[in-house]
Amino acid sequence: MMIHKHVSATFANFIHTILDLRFIIIIIIIIIIIIIIIIIIIIIIIIIIIIIIILIIIIIIIIIIIIIIIIIIIIIIIIIIIIIIIVIVIVIIIIIIIIIISSSIIIIISSSIIIIIIIIIIIIIIIVVL
């Protein structure tokens, strides 16, 4: 009987130990699952933060490119306007010079015609008088 009681007690202790081990294993598994979930959540948060940072950088780069393009277009427009103004001024100056030269030529021609007429009249008078 003593042996039977001893075996029973040992068996009960063994079962109890196995149950304790199962409980410990379940707790360890739960802790591991919680740790894995936390790690996954942290990784997802880091990935989301990285994606947001990349998107912000891309948006900033696009805005900078757009600003540069607008500045270049404005500079080109200003240069074109300046060139047009310079060309208009040059054309006006050339027209004024042409008008001045042509008027002076007309004055010279008209004065020379008057001189020729006077000379002809003088010649005619000299011929008539003689």
Image: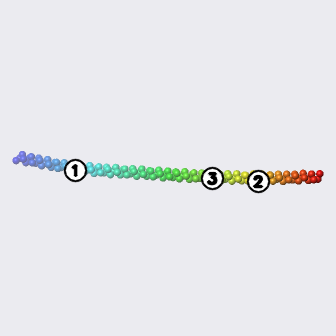
Give the residue pinned by disc 2: 103
Name the outermost residue toward the left: 1
Q: Amino acid at mark 1?
A: Ile
Mark 3: amino acid? Ile
Residue 71 position, x and y percent, is: 54, 52
- Going by the numbered disc 2, the residue's amino acid type is Ser
**Measured from the top left, where is residue 113 in percent x and y?**
83, 52
Q: Position of residue 101 (x, y in %)?
A: 75, 51
10 with respect to 43 (left or right):
left
Task: Give the residue at x 76% y 54%.
Answer: 103
Inter-mark Cα distance, 1 to 3: 86 Å
Question: Which residue is label 1 attached to?
Answer: 26
Which SS class for mark 2? helix
Q: CA distance from mark 1 to mark 2?
A: 114 Å
1 left or right of 122 in image:
left
Q: Residue at x 87, y 51 (%)?
A: 119
The local crowd at label 2, few if under 14, some if 14 to 19, many if 20 or more residues have their Cα within 10 Å, is few
Q: Earlier in the sequence, mark 1 or mark 2?
A: 1
Which callout, 1 or 2, points to the residue nearer the camera?
Answer: 2
* Circle on res. 55: none
Q: Nearer the viewer, mark 1 or mark 3?
A: 3
Seen at 35% across and 52% down, the residue is 45
Q: Closer to the N terminus: mark 3 or mark 2?
A: 3
Residue tagged 3: 84
